[in-house]
Amino acid sequence: MRKVVTAPAAVLSTPGAEVDACDPGIVELAGELVAIMRASPGCVGLAAPQIGVSAQVFCVDVTGHPKAATTHGEFVLCNAKIIEASRWRPGREGCMSVPDLTGDVRRAARIVVEAVRPGTGEPVTITTDAFEARALQHEIDHCAGKLFLDRVAGAHAVYQRKVYL
Amino acid sequence: MHELAITVIGPDRSGIVADVSEALAEVGANLTDSTMTRLRGHFAMTLICNGLSSQDAERALGPLATGGLIATVRPVEPEVDEAPAGEPYLVSVHGADRLGIVAAVTRVVAAAGGNITDLTTRLTGPLYLLVAEVDVPPGTADDLGERLAVVAAELDVDVSLRRSDSEIL
């Protein structure tokens, strides 16, 4: 199983390419992302660049998270784009690729995302809110070569991580 | 009325803020603005106070030197009220640690007429992070963004410049 890449790493700063969601390699990548997310305590999402693959693929599962409202369970999306974003709220984020820091980031608490599912290439529109919306925006950022460090809310909005899950 | 700019730094331990603020309070110092934080195991205090002479402040803080705290005191002129001259922006820079990241980035900001109002850097493992709050002259942010991109490419780091959220209720 591939290891999670940590910053600084070029792959984390490079916009991922759009993918052919029906490509068997992408289906395999999707499975690998889910497997690594499952094996990582506290992990609620993982994007392909985080395992060294510059591609617009990520998985998310915020099931049972105390800050979640709407949840869609475990899912993998390819070529995801945010179509609508509203209700901007601050919140604390961490990242397996930035293991020693957390930061306050303003994200939309309600979003609509269009993407395609790996394997079938079926287009999908996801409307969600709260923590799942935050997780999706964080992962879509990874696919665009962005880290939460690029969005922290101020000079005093970065913190040394005190608790590792 | 003059004010004093005081810095205190020393190895972090419990009670530094209490010791320093108590010593100052006993000689009538009124603390106004301050920042106090821990930097790689050192506790650093920067504060402005009034109501006492610099000699009194130095005398009050002198005994703390035995505990490893280094204090400096100097009189400063009170702030002149000025409306913010620029638009509030945030700069994030992150990448592999190397010599001169802060110097190069802040020189670009200064050359563009930007004024840094707050800045934090963190080194964690090989990752260096800089987050700065900058007042940018109106209408010049795009130009600053382009200049920052050039210096970031030279330093092989990532940079982002974005408008700071200003929510006023």
Image (cartoon, rainbow, N blue to C red):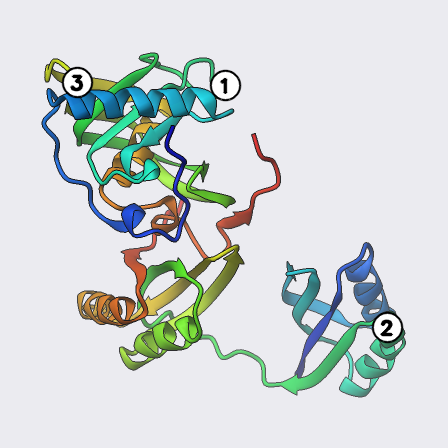
Pointer 2 chain: B
Q: Nearer the viewer, residue B71 or A77?
A: A77
Q: What amino acid type is highlighted by mark number 1?
A: Pro
Q: Nearer the viewer, mark 3 or mark 2?
A: 3
Coordinates of residue B50 in the picture (x, y in percent): 71, 76
Alpha carbons under labels 2 and 1: distance apart: 46 Å
- Residue situated in front as seen by the camera: A18 or B54: A18
Tag of residue A117:
3
Quadrant location of the N terminus of chain B?
A: bottom right
**Residue at image point 63% right, 65% down:** B34
Q: Tag 3, which chain? A: A
Asked whether the viewer can see residue A78, the reply is: yes
Marks 3/1 same chain = yes
Say what secondary structure mark 1 lies in: loop
Please say if A152 is above or below A127: below
Q: Quadrant of the C terminus of chain B?
A: top left
Image mark for residue B39? none
Query: Quick check: can you spot residue A87?
Result: no
Give whichever of A122, A25 is nearer the camera.
Answer: A25
Task: Identify the residue at horizontal 11%, vertical 23% (top origin).
Answer: A23
A75 relative position to A114: left or right: right
Which is in the foreground here, disc 3 or disc 1?
Answer: 3
Q: Mark 1 — residue?
A: A66
The residue pinned by badge 2 equals B64
User: Tag 3's secondary structure?
Assistant: loop
Report the side of B4 relative to B134 (left or right).
right
Q: Position of residue B70 (x, y in %)?
A: 77, 76
Q: Mark 2: few, some, or many residues within 10 Å (few <14, many ≥20)?
A: some
Between the residue at mark 3 and the residue at mark 1, the CA separation in whole angstroms equals 27 Å
Secondary element at tag 2:
helix
Amino acid under label 3? Arg
| x and y percentages locating residue B113 in the rendered image | 30, 78
